[in-house]
Structure formats: structure tokens, C-alpha cells
Image (cartoon, rainbow, N blue to C red):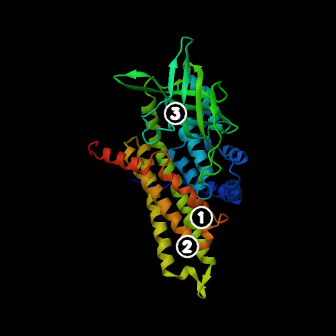
């Protein structure tokens, strides 16, 4: 198994690093403080073709592998997790369901603008009373006599759902009953549809300038052809989307951890105590060595999961493992980076303070650590409780 990056991927990684250091790093602190998604930065990312990396050329994409997208997400997350999750959610959660499960008409209608970064889309699975238990969906969609879906319910914590360029959200909803169980389907709801209301932005602990809203549907009517995928397959299809998303979240976590390593190295080289550079203190050297070790192991984990996907092999367990390990070490590494910085690590103008706040959500979003362990146990053949 060869986990080396291709020459093209290495050049892409270098380009991304330069872009991040030149266009994102100088503004990350102020964007975090202002708490609004910087649309100029989104436009710059679109200009680099980042939103279309993994989509076919016929829809305006580049046809690249998932790992290439992950490299972009990792590099952005070294500096700015809010922009990193904007890209990850836009591609993996907003646009990918259309590519994977959409009709040719749906693909032609939505994908070109999404791949160009001219539009964003949201992915509405979580509900106020259904997070990890996503199967506890309460939102309903009834097919009316006029051939339109009538949607009622709400969704929570939906990324990219209320930006100036958001074009639609895809939601899961109960469309009937099958074999005594809920029939859950996926339906496209364009922004601006009457009865579709976007709540105020959440005031979050981290990811301050990521766009996140609660959504409400009150007799919201959309055409029957807005059904995405086969009726009754919505929940299963969304879970398949999450397998890829977990690899991308692992990449984001690795980027955040690498940012903490980089900031810590810079800090200890420039700080003195007891008459010498604190970089000479063995206790700090060991701590940073452990941080680098965890970060590199997590990187190899998501590389392997992405490689398995590209080989057409099963990767659900490895995706869950990568997401679980990378998200948990991101929290640990960010905590250690704050400790290394001492009192300065608790000050907002130091990047490690922002990284520490941003890290925690990685153990929650797109599957909690507990759910990841449950998925791994099932893949190992352990029985359900």
C-alpha cells in the first residue's frame, strides 16, 4: 500500500499552503471575532476550484480524488476551522448527495453552480430531538393531491443553510410507513420556498464564522420531482454520505492539530524563561513530540481510509476509526498547545486559543465519538445491545 502523495497532490498541497498563509491567516482572528462567514474568502476559494475538486468535469469539476479534497481541508484547518468546515460541508454534505443520488435533471440543475462555488447547499439530517439518534426523524413530507410534497418539521445545526449564496437544503423526512417502520426519504428544499424559515445564527463556542442555523418547515410545498434518490432510501443514503464526510472531518482535525504543533514550535523558539529558551526544556520537548506523533498517526489514518475508498474497497470501519482518533487527538493537542503557551494560550489573539475552542465540536459533529465506537464495534462483528 502506497500512501505517498502523487506529484500533482504535492504541488496542490504547496499551493494550498501558500494560499492559506497569504489570504486566510492574516484575517482568521478578526473573522472569528466578527462571527460572520467571509464571503470574499469563499469567493477566493471558489476561484481556486476547491468546491469542484471531486466532481466530474462535465459539471465543472476537476475529477480529483477524495484525498485531494482532504488535503485542501487540512491546509485550511491549520489556520481557520470555520472556513475548513464551510468547504467540507459544501462539498461532502451539500453537493455530494446530488451527485451520488440525483437524477440527471437534478445534477444538471444544481451541480454546476455548486462545483463553481457560486452556490452552497445544506444537509438537513439532525433535528432538535434527534442528534445521534438520527433515525428518530419527526419531520414529515406528505404528497398532496397537487403532486407536491408538503413538508412540516424542523432541523438543527445545519451548516451553510443561511449564507447569501445558499441555494437549497436537502432534508430527510418521513414520507410514509414501510414494513411497520418509518419510510424516510430525502427531499430538496430550495431557499426562498414559502413555508421554509431559516432561524437566527447559533451563538457557538467555536466555528464562529461558520454559517449554522435551525430550519423550520411549515406547510412548505415543493414539487414531487424534488425527491432525491428512491423513496424510502433517504436515511440509508445519507448514512453513506457520512462515511465520506468522516474522512474529511478527520482531515480537518489533523489540520487543526498540525496548526497547534506549528504554533507551539514557533512559541517555544521565541520564548525564554530561567535564562534560556523554553524550547530547551525537556518537558516541553516531550510534549511537542507527543503532539507531533499523534498528529502524524491521525494523518496516516485518514490517508488510509481515503485510499481504501479510491480502491473500491470497504472503508466504513476505517473512516469511523480515522474520525474518532483524529477528533480526539485534536482536542488533546489543542489543550497541550494552550498549556505550552501558558497565560497567552488563554488570550484570543493567540491562534491556539481559537483552535482549542474549535476542536471540541470535532468529537460531536458527523457522528459523536460514542457513535464512532459503536460503528467500529458493529464492523468488528460485535452484537447489538
Report if the CB atoms under discs 2 and 1 are less than 8 Å apart. yes
Q: CA distance from mark 3 to mark 1?
A: 34 Å
Q: Quadrant of residue 105?
A: top right
Relative to residue 106, is residue 206 depicted above or below? below
The local secondary structure at tag 3 comes to: helix
Q: Secondary structure at mark 2?
A: helix
How far across and how far down the image is residue 277, in percent? 59, 82
Quarter holding residue 297: bottom left
Cα separation, mark 2 vs mark 3, equals 42 Å
Q: Position of residue 266 (x, y in %)?
A: 61, 72
Please indicate, yes or no, whether residue 6 appears anywhere in the rendered image. Answer: no
Residue position for label 2: 340
Placement of the C terminus among the 4 image quadrants: top left
Mark 3 or 1, nearer chain start: 3
Please name the residue that numbered disc 3 is placed on: 97
**Residue 15 place in picture, x, y as percent:** 63, 55
Question: Mark 1 highlights which residue?
Answer: 352
Tell me where residue 172 appears, x and y as whole percent.
Answer: 49, 30
The residue closer to the viewer here, 120 or 371, is: 371
Q: Nearer the viewer, mark 3 or mark 1?
A: 1
Q: Crowding near pointer 3: few (<14 within 10 Å), some, many (20+)? A: many
Identity of the residue drawn at 52% across and 65% down: 335
Residue furthest right in the image: 40
Q: Are marks 2 and 3 in contact (CB under 8 Å)?
A: no
Residue density around tag 2, few if under 14, some if 14–19, many if 20 or more, within 10 Å: many
Tell me which numbered mark, 2 or 3, is placed earlier along the sequence: 3
C-alpha gap between disc 2 and disc 1: 10 Å
* Label 1 secondary element: helix
Q: How many labels, in total?
A: 3
Amino acid at each position: 500500500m502506497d500512501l505517498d502523495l502523487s506529484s500533482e497532490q504535492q504541488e496542490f498541497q504547496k499551493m494550498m499552503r501558500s494560499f492559506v498563509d497569504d489570504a486566510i491567516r492574516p484575517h482568521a482572528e478578526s473573522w472569528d471575532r466578527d462571527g460572520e462567514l467571509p464571503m470574499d474568502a469563499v469567493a477566493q476559494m471558489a476561484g481556486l476550484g476547491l468546491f469542484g475538486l471531486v466532481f466530474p468535469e462535465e459539471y465543472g469539476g476537476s475529477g480529483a480524488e477524495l484525498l485531494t479534497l482532504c488535503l485542501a481541508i487540512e491546509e485550511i484547518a491549520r489556520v481557520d476551522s470555520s472556513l475548513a468546515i464551510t468547504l467540507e460541508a459544501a462539498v461532502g454534505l451539500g453537493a455530494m448527495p446530488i451527485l451520488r443520488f440525483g437524477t440527471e435533471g437534478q445534477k444538471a440543475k444544481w451541480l454546476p453552480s455548486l462545483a463553481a462555488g457560486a452556490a452552497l447547499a445544506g444537509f438537513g439530517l439532525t433535528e432538535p430531538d434527534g442528534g445521534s439518534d438520527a433515525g428518530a426523524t419527526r419531520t414529515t413530507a406528505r404528497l398532496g393531491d397537487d403532486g407536491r410534497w408538503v413538508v412540516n418539521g424542523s432541523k438543527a445545526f445545519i451548516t451553510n443553510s443561511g449564507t447569501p449564496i445558499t441555494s437549497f437544503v436537502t432534508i430527510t423526512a418521513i414520507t410514509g410507513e414501510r414494513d411497520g417502520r418509518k419510510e424516510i426519504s430525502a427531499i430538496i428544499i430550495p431557499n426562498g420556498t414559502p413555508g421554509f424559515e431559516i432561524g437566527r445564527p447559533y451563538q457557538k463556542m467555536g466555528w464562529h464564522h461558520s454559517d449554522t442555523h435551525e430550519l423550520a418547515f411549515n406547510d412548505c410545498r415543493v414539487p414531487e420531482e424534488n425527491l432525491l434518490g428512491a423513496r424510502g432510501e433517504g436515511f440509508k443514503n445519507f448514512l453513506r454520505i457520512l462515511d465520506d464526510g468522516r474522512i474529511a472531518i478527520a482531515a480537518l482535525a489533523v489540520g487543526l492539530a498540525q496548526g497547534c504543533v506549528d504554533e507551539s514550535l514557533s512559541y517555544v523558539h521565541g520564548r525564554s524563561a530561567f535564562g534560556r529558551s523554553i524550547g530547551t526544556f525537556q518537558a516541553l520537548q516531550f510534549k511537542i513530540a507527543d503532539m507531533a506523533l499523534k498528529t502524524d498517526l491521525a494523518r496516516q489514518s485518514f490517508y488510509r481510509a481515503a485510499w481504501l475508498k479510491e480502491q473500491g474497497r470497504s472503508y466504513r470501519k476505517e473512516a469511523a476509526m480515522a474520525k474518532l482518533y483524529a477528533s480526539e487527538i485534536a482536542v488533546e493537542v489543542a489543550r497541550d498547545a494552550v498549556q505550552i503557551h501558558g497565560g497567552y494560550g488563554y488570550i484570543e489573539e493567540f491562534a491556539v486559543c481559537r483552535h482549542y475552542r474549535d476542536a471540541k465540536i470535532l468529537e460531536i459533529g458527523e457522528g459523536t465519538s460514542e457513535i464512532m465506537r459503536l460503528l467500529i464495534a458493529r464492523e468488528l462483528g460485535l452484537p447489538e445491545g
